[in-house]
Amino acid sequence: MGANPLQRSLFCLLIGAAFSLWRASFLTEVRRGWPGVLAGAEKFLTAVVRDNAIGYNQEKSAQKWMVGFYLNSAAFRIDAILRNRASGKKKLAAALRSGDFSEFQKLFTTGLHAVHPSHAWEVIYNVLARLVENLLPVTARSNRSARRRRINLCK
């Protein structure tokens, strides 16, 4: 993976999306509306400027904004993967035609504010799981081949 910029990029985007979903998973049980989202954003910004640090308690108090931040972070990273798509990968192309991806595209187009955060989390998670399943085996095979080449060079 080290020598392949596309694989490195895809791997980092997958890890970033997974981290964002992990953080969002603790914040999804909230009803959101723009007044609460904007108030949460203000609380978060005030805490960052005041304390120069953020922990779970601050995230929880700004939950209506934070959950959207993390879900959007994951969605934007997944969208970047889908746009780059590692063209030519038949297995990935077939996966992209699945219902998970069409639901993600609909969610991404209409915006996360249109659905409950727990539903958005599930949609994004399902797409991420499908991407990991279809992209990481390719990376793992490439790494095994690279290790074999290094081992052969050492003989």
Image (cartoon, rainbow, N blue to C red):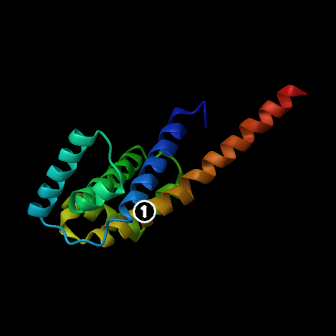
Residue type beneath disc 1: Val
Q: Secondary structure at mark 1?
A: helix
Name the residue located 53 percent from the left edge and 56 percent from the top edge.
132
At which x and y percent is residue 122? Answer: 38, 70
**Foreground pick, 52 / 105:** 52
Q: Is residue 25 left or right of residue 9?
A: left
Residue farthest front in this picture: 51
At which x and y percent is residue 88? Answer: 51, 47
Q: Is residue 144 left or right of residue 65?
A: right
Q: Is residue 30 left or right of residue 127?
A: left
> Neighbour class for label 1 at 10 Å: few (<14), some, many (≥20)?
many
The quadrant holding residue 144 is: top right
Q: Is residue 61 left or right of residue 141?
A: left
Question: Which residue was labeled with disc 1?
Answer: 127
Q: Is residue 4 placed above or below 97 in the rendered structure?
A: above
Name the residue located 32 percent from the left edge and 65 percent from the top edge.
27
